[in-house]
Image (tube, grey):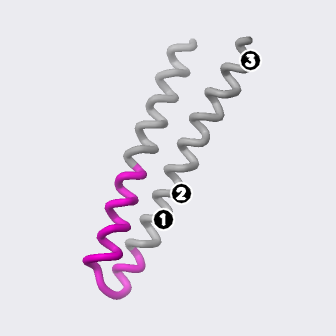
Amino acid sequence: MAQDRAAARRRRLLWAGILAVAGLALLLLGLTVADGALAWLEVVLAIALLVTSYAVQRVARREALYTDHERR
């Protein structure tokens, strides 16, 4: 049971990292290479990915915090 929770937490943190890297790459492209409406679309999508990454990371850490508290 504890191993399942740890594996789920690692998966969530992995997805958070992937989303963050994708968001940063898209933000870089939107701010440097793209022009016009496409640039704004990329920047907005990058910000959405970064916010989603933060939310997934926060959920994973909150579960770990409360799970550790319940075990004591």
Quarter residue 51 falls in: bottom right
Residue, far bottom:
36
Rendered residue at 46%/58% (across/down): 49
Residue, far left:
33
Q: Earlier in the sequence, mark 3 or mark 2?
A: 2
- Badge 3: residue crowd in 10 Å (few <14, some 14–19, many ≥20): few
Residue tagged by mark 1? 47
Q: Give, as a three-letter code, the residue at label 3.
A: Glu
Task: Reply above or below: 16 against 26.
Answer: above
Check if mark 2's residue and mark 1's residue have beta carbons within 8 Å. yes
Label the magenta part by its dominant secondary structure.
Answer: helix
- Out of 7 and 24, give the one closest to the viewer: 24
Rendered residue at 34%/65% (across/down): 26
For the record, the magenta segment spans 19-41
Residue tagged by mark 3? 70
Task: Reply above or below: 44 against 53.
Answer: below
